[in-house]
Image (tube, rainbow, N blue to C red):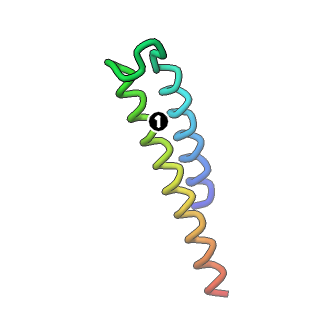
Amino acid sequence: MKIFTYIAIAIALGLIVFNILQIDFSNPFEGESTVAFIGIIAGICAILLLLLLRFSKMIVDKTNE
């Protein structure tokens, strides 16, 4: 599970970087840039959820000891 979370976080970071490169900074809220912003927010949410899963697993492991 530990390796899966690291791989998923790396993929989410890659998608965030990709979406940042897709933003048209002259018109940031029109066309494809809106989709890029949604992708960035989705990537950040995915990272937060994976970190939450990781910390909850750590807590469960410590309480079972």
Examine the rendered structure and indicate whether residue 56 appears above or below residue 37: below
Percent coordinates x, y for residue 6 in the rendering = 61, 50
Percent coordinates x, y for residue 48 in the rendering = 52, 54
User: What residue is at 47 percent from the left and 49 percent from the top?
Assistant: 46
User: What residue is at 54 percent from the left and 39 percent from the top?
Assistant: 11
- Between 1 and 56, which is closer to the camera in this rendering? 56
Percent coordinates x, y for residue 39 in the rendering = 42, 34
Q: What amino acid does circle 1 point to?
A: Ile
> Is 18 placed left or right of 2 in the picture?
left
In the displayed image of the protein, which residue is found farthest to the top? 26
For the N terminus, the image quarter is: bottom right
Query: What count of labels does the image hold?
Result: 1
Give the structural element (helix, strand or loop) at label 1: helix
- Between 1 and 22, which is closer to the camera in this rendering? 22
User: What residue is at 47 percent from the left and 20 percent from the top?
Assistant: 22
**Classed neighbour count for the residue bearing mark 1: other residues with Cα under 10 Å, few (<14), some (14–19), many (≥20):** many
User: What residue is at 56 percent from the left and 53 percent from the top?
Assistant: 4
> Is 9 placed left or right of 42 in the picture?
right
For the C terminus, the image quarter is: bottom right
Could you say which quadrant of the image residue 3 lies in?
bottom right
Examine the rendered structure and indicate whether residue 63 appears above or below residue 34: below
Percent coordinates x, y for residue 55 in the rendering = 60, 67
Q: Label 1, on which residue?
A: 40
Examine the rendered structure and indicate whether residue 60 appears above or below residue 48: below
